[in-house]
Image: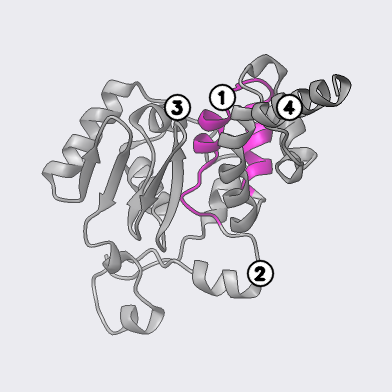
Amino acid sequence: MNGWIKLHRQIMENPMYFAETFTRVQAWIDLLILANHKTGYIYVRGNRVEVHRGQVGMSEESLAERWKWSRGKVRRFLKHLENEQQIVQQKSHIKSLISITNYEEYQQTVQQTEQQTGQQTITNNNDKNEKKGSNVHTNVDFDVFWNAYDKKVGAKDKLRRKWNKLTNAERTAIMEYIPRYKQAQPDKQFRKHPATFLNNRAWEDELIMPHETDKSKSNQFVVNNW
């Protein structure tokens, strides 16, 4: 069968997208959707990890939760894709990156695609959408935020839809804010619920770090004992 389609990342906002356990084909398409269209970064346990164009920065655990699979099934599936030379995996004690082989072939322009036959293409329109200022979906998937924030309470599906409506700049600001927020409030029971954090745009709040509080108390002690 010849021809191609455009598949927008906003398909993830459709309630049917996560309604059922993923098939293997759905999982493969999901990886294509999750792959970065340009170099960016994510935070893993407070460490900044660079994610290049065509890479997915998600762990087996996050993919298992996303696809409603076991971790073993995810591992076997990724190994199969690697054996078929569809992906390359990079793993360490900090990061887990999946590189889509021949990613550029999935990102051709309409004109390039029309000049070829027998090739199915998923076209990435993120660059065009960013210029228009619209919300764009990037590799900063909701599950990355969910795991980084580390207070897993609330209706996850509603939170995911809220996250998917954020802009690139907002998601980046949140991921940069979280490590400092956790440092300022290390006890997770006193952190805001994820829904409150997102709805109130808490990442724009000023943070008071523990050492700043200690310094303030020290200065107060000096003044009182002058």
Q: Mark 3 points at which residue?
A: 65
Q: Which of marks 3 and 4 is nearer the N terminus?
A: 3
Q: Main secondary structure of the magenta part?
A: helix
Residue density around tag 2, few if under 14, some if 14–19, many if 20 or more, within 10 Å: few
Label 3 neighbour load within 10 Å: few <14, some 14-19, many 20+: some
Q: Please, what is the three-letter code of the amino acid marked with disc 2? A: Gly
- The reply, left or right, for residue 41 in relation to residue 218 is left
Q: Which of marks 2 and 3 is in front?
A: 2
Residue at position x 77%, y 31% from top? 196
Determine which of the numbered discs, if any, sits on residue 213 in the image.
4
Left or right for 207, reference 36: right
Residue 180 in the magenta stretch? The answer is no
Q: What amino acid is labelled 1 in the image? A: Asp
Q: Are marks 2 and 1 in contact (CB under 8 Å)?
A: no
Q: In which quarter of the image is residue 47?
A: top left
From mark 1 to mark 3, how far is it between C-alphas? 15 Å
| Magenta-tinted stretch | 137-164
Instruction: From the image, tell me which residue sits under label 1.
Output: 150
Instruction: Determine the CA span between mark 3 and mark 4.
Output: 39 Å
The tag on residue 133 is: 2
Label 4 SS: helix
Quadrant position of residue 159: top right
Q: Any magenta on residue 143?
A: yes
